[in-house]
Amino acid sequence: MLRYLDPTTTMTLGDGIRELRTAEGADSDAGENVAPDLVPDIDIHDSIHVLFACPTNLAGEISAHLWTIFGTTVRLREMRRVNMHQDHRQVLADIGHAKLVKTWFKNIPHLIATFYCSMRMTRKWPASDYSDYLDVPLDELRKEFNICLPNRRGTSVSRGRAGAGLRHVRDFNSWVSTHDNL
């Protein structure tokens, strides 16, 4: 299990982000494979995954979006801008509508618990200021903001490729464009 998923981990937010990116095959910063205008958003998104202990499978991505809406200062219009970006839309198309809806329904109990936990926070986490917290241990951040993490019993915490999708869609698109003659 990835250490950042442990509710009691003492690793820092920065170490957790590095662990997540290593697990996703994105050892370097997000800028190498992501559209330049999405890099700051991916950095914020990765910090949300780590702080709120969301795995990177599809269920974890959905959970991270709920935490973003209800547990952070990120505004819906900022999320919409990212979600409307062609790279993000391509990832969703690759996942497929049926699989996305099935995952939502399968995880309703966990998503309700996530919503409930987000409402119990003492204040919303200022996600755009994530870099101010890189050296702070996750257990301290979770205590400071009263972040209770829903029990993941019955849900998979396996690493997934959903999170890596946005990082690697540009690699695939550039490969396709260089191999048009196949």
Image (tube, rainbow, N blue to C red):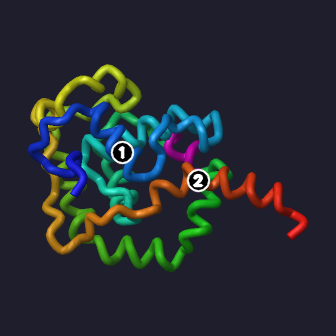
In the rendered view, tell whether residue 106 sits above or below residue 110: below
Q: Position of residue 26 (x, y in %)?
A: 48, 45
Of residues 76 and 47, the one nearer the viewer is 47
Of the image marks 1 and 2, the number of the one nearer the N terminus: 1
Quadrant hosting residue 81: top right
Determine which of the numbered discs, if any, sits on residue 148 in the image: none
- Tell me which segment is drawn in magenta: 77-83
Amino acid carrying label 1: it is Thr
Let me know if residue 89 appears in the view.
Answer: yes
In the rendered view, tell whether residue 32 sits above or below residue 176: above
Give the residue at the far top of this rendering.
132
Say whether residue 161 is left or right of residue 54.
Answer: right
Helix, strand or loop: magenta stretch: helix
Residue at (31%, 77%) from the top-left corner?
Answer: 106
Q: Position of residue 181 (x, y in %)?
A: 90, 66
Q: Are marks 1 and 2 in contact (CB under 8 Å)?
A: no
**Mark 2 sits on what residue?**
168
Residue at (36%, 24%) from the top-left corner?
Answer: 131
Query: Where the C terminus falls, by quadrant?
Result: bottom right
Look at the image and say whether residue 15 sits in the magenta stretch: no
Q: Position of residue 68 (x, y in %)?
A: 36, 45
Say whether residue 30 is left or right of residue 158.
Answer: right
Residue at (35%, 52%) from the top-left corner?
Answer: 64
Let me know if residue 118 appears in the view.
Answer: no
Amino acid carrying label 2: it is His
- Distance (Cα) linking label 1 and label 2: 22 Å
**Mark 1 sits on what residue?**
68
